[in-house]
């Protein structure tokens, strides 16, 4: 018996020693200030009448809500209430504790002294130090809801309690709200602190300052001419100057403009005429007097060829993408995500938001890009005496870079810089690391290869499309060369490319067992890394666009000559579109093994979709579009098409800002999501108009000398 008692005492001693060592380790891993402030907070919290700051801090902790089984696992608490708590010796700050309990991953917001770092808080959480009345302030979910009672700590992230913008931020806020101000600083996380990059400040402000300075310059020139010329001559002069660089019409093309040689001859006839310098021409192109001309025009004629349906197709596809992004980016903040998932998998109507083959709208953009690239290059060849020279190809590619990169770079700076000026909420964290990858991978955006690097490292993730589009754009001159060289060779090359991209898509899907249904594809890392972003799996729609552009440019007569042909074409078009959507719902489950059905669908559905869209374009061109032609050729689409590129780049930023400011979960209903979509749409269109005038359009109006021949 004595030996038994001795053994029990020995075990008790061992346990006490282990507990003491753990407590000592915990204490030693905390700074003195953090340990003291935490003890002060907990001691006050356990008083019969706690101080006001302790009550506020406790009330700011996240608590479990209802509908946990429906997806309401997250417990965000209150960021603002936490920030309002101030003890005599410390202030409170908000931290997000990410936890895993069995299959359920969730987070809880906690309010702790600001003297504790994230590493110190990890120690406090792991040792269950944060308690009130013997109960943990971070309790696990009840076992009746989750078949696991043990919590696993995933991560701890804390929000900064204060933001101190530099003086230049305030100056920019007063000069150009929502454009220059938020891009004044591009910032990156480095060791938990914000590091300001002065070069981005310079680039951002210069890109906005140049159009404003050019506007002032043009106003001064106009004022001087008003004093020097008669009213009639003044009117003629101003008209010719304002149209020197053309006005944008449908699809971003230029209207017919006076030839520079003829204009110079007319101007030279005036006494005292001096040709404008290159600096004067550039400033004229950047002035708002020039960039505002024709932006809101509803004329849809493009260099003698209508292509009038392209504006409607482009804008409606953009709205489709915006609708999907409005849903996709907000899913992380829903309190009934399971309800949303059940609704999506039950009805094909949700393909308009984020269900089924939602991203077919992107393939429509690739189709339009290929069509317009072929038309543009063939038109340049015709203007250059039917020659496809290296100089012409170089100018063709430089014009494309000039078309997309200025606004692309500006949006990149704008997105990264906005972090330095805003106090975010608990739902911002999933996007911070993605955006802050610009620190290491900004160069991929500059050289347009961001879709080739891992998706987690893309700087400003939604700009991956620009890289894919440009990579496809590089193939247009080669295909045009084969087209002009020999029709048989061209057929073999184009057919081989189309077959190769189809086989590549099917093979990747089968080998990696990829899903074909949203939102399963969003949750599958291999889907994005190996399939969705890659040119070898996404080239088919762009190639079909090139072929369509060549056909439209060189055809001798209409494709459809009789009404029965048009009726059959429309029947096949609608049948194919409906079948593609419905088949995605049939194949909605992620295959547990290589699936032939999934592989065939993945390999073919994008090309089949764009073939159906191609029929819409051709039928509208030949006058057999009916009410669809009337819809696609509405005049309202023309100005919206002019700002569509800016709208595509800016709209995800508004969605992220909206979610980043949320302190409580968003409740899904169709009505709520409809209001969110239209709110994001209106804001995006308004800011897109400003960006188009200040950043995008000036570079569109700049003409390379070799293109003015």
Image: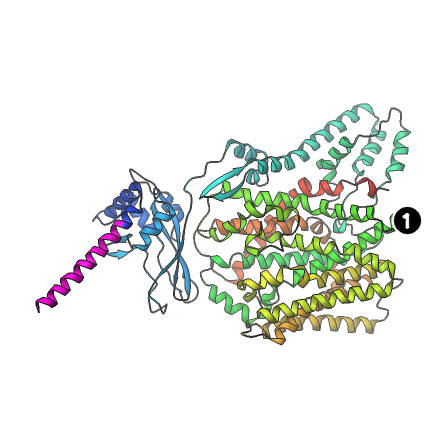
Q: Is residue 221 visible?
A: yes
Furthest-front residue in this view: 3
User: As rendered, which of 581 and 451 lies closer to the eye?
Assistant: 451
List x then y, in percent, for residue 593.
56, 75
Q: Is residue 494 left or right of residue 140?
A: right
Range shown magenta: 1-24
Q: In terms of secondary structure, what is the magenta stretch mainly?
A: helix
User: As rendered, which of 238 and 383 lies closer to the eye?
Assistant: 383
Image quarter of the C terminus: top right
Q: Is residue 633 visible?
A: no
List x then y, in percent, for residue 525.
54, 62
Location of residue 233 (image quadrant): top right
For label 1, the residue is 385
User: How many residues crowd around disc 1 within 10 Å: few (fewer than 14), some, or many (20 or more)?
Assistant: few
Residue at 79% from the left image edge and 62% from the top image edge: 547
Secondary structure of the residue carrying numbered label 1: loop
User: As rendered, which of 630 and 422 lies closer to the eye?
Assistant: 422
Is residue 3 inside the magenta stretch?
yes
List x then y, in percent, for residue 262.
90, 37
List x then y, in percent, for residue 430.
49, 53
């Amino acid at each position: 018996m004595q030996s038994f008692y001795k053994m029990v005492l020995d075990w008790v001693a061992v346990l006490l020693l282990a507990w003491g060592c753990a407590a000592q380790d915990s204490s030693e891993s905390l700074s003195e200030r953090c340990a003291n402030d935490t003890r002060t907070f907990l001691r006050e919290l356990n008083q019969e009448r706690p101080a006001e700051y302790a009550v506020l801090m406790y009330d700011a902790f996240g608590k479990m809500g209802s509908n946990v089984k429906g997806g309401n696992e997250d417990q965000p608490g209150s960021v603002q209430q936490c920030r309002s708590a101030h003890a005599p010796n410390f202030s409170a700050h908000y931290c997000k504790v990410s936890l895993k309990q069995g299959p359920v991953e969730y987070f809880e917001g906690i309010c702790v002294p600001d003297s504790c770092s994230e590493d110190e808080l990890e120690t406090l959480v792991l040792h269950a130090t944060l308690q009130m009345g013997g109960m943990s302030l971070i309790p696990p979910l009840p076992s009746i809801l989750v078949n696991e009672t043990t919590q696993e700590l995933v991560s701890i992230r804390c929000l900064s309690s204060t933001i101190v913008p530099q003086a230049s931020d305030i100056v920019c806020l007063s000069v150009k709200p929502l454009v220059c101000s938020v891009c004044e600083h591009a910032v990156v996380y480095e060791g938990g602190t914000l590091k300001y990059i002065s070069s981005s400040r310079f680039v951002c402000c210069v890109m906005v300052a140049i159009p404003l300075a050019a506007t002032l310059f043009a106003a001064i020139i106009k004022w001087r001419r008003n004093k020097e010329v008669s009213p009639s001559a003044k009117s003629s002069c101003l008209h010719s100057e304002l149209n020197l660089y053309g006005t944008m019409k449908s699809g971003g093309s230029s209207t017919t403009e006076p030839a520079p040689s003829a204009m110079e001859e007319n101007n030279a006839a005036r006494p005292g005429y001096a040709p404008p310098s290159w600096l004067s021409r550039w400033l004229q192109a950047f002035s708002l007097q020039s960039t505002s001309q024709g932006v809101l025009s509803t004329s849809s004629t493009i260099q003698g060829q209508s292509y009038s349906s392209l504006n409607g197709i482009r804008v409606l596809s953009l709205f489709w993408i915006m609708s999907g992004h409005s849903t996709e980016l907000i899913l992380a903040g829903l309190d009934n995500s399971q309800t949303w998932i059940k609704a999506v998998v039950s009805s094909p109507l949700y393909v308009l938001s984020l269900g089924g083959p939602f991203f077919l709208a992107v393939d429509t953009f690739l189709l339009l890009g290929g069509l317009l690239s072929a038309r543009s290059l063939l038109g340049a060849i015709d203007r250059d005496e039917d020659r496809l020279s290296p100089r012409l190809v170089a100018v063709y590619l430089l014009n494309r870079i000039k078309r997309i990169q200025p606004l692309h770079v500006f949006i990149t700076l704008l997105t990264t810089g906005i972090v330095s000026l805003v106090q975010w909420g608990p739902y911002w964290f999933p996007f911070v690391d993605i955006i802050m990858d610009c620190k290491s991978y900004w160069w991929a955006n500059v050289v347009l290869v961001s879709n080739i690097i891992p998706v987690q490292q893309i700087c400003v993730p939604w700009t991956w499309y620009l890289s894919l589009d440009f990579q496809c754009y590089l193939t247009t001159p080669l295909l045009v060369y084969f087209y002009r060289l020999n029709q048989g060779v061209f057929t073999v090359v184009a057919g081989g490319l189309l077959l190769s991209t189809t086989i590549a898509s099917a093979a990747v899907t089968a080998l990696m067992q990829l899903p074909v249904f949203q939102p399963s594809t969003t949750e599958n890392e291999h889907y994005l890394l190996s399939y969705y972003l890659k040119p070898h799996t996404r080239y088919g729609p762009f190639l079909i666009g090139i072929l369509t552009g060549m056909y439209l440019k060189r055809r001798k007569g209409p494709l459809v000559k009789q009404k029965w042909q048009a009726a059959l074409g429309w029947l096949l078009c609608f049948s194919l579109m409906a079948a593609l959507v419905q088949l995605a719902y049939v194949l909605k489950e992620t295959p547990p093994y290589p699936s032939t059905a999934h592989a065939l669908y993945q390999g073919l559905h994008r090309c089949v979709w764009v073939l159906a869209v191609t029929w819409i374009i051709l039928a509208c061109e030949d006058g057999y579009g009916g009410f669809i032609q009337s819809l696609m050729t509405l005049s309202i689409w023309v100005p919206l098409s002019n700002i569509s590129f800016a709208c595509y780049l800016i709209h995800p930023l508004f969605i992220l800002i909206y979610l980043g400011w949320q302190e409580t979960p968003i409740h899904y209903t169709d009505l709520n999501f409809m209001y969110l979509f239209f709110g994001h749409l209106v804001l995006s269109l308004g800011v897109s108009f400003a960006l188009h005038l200040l950043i995008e359009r000036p570079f569109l109006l700049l003409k390379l000398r070799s293109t003015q021949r």
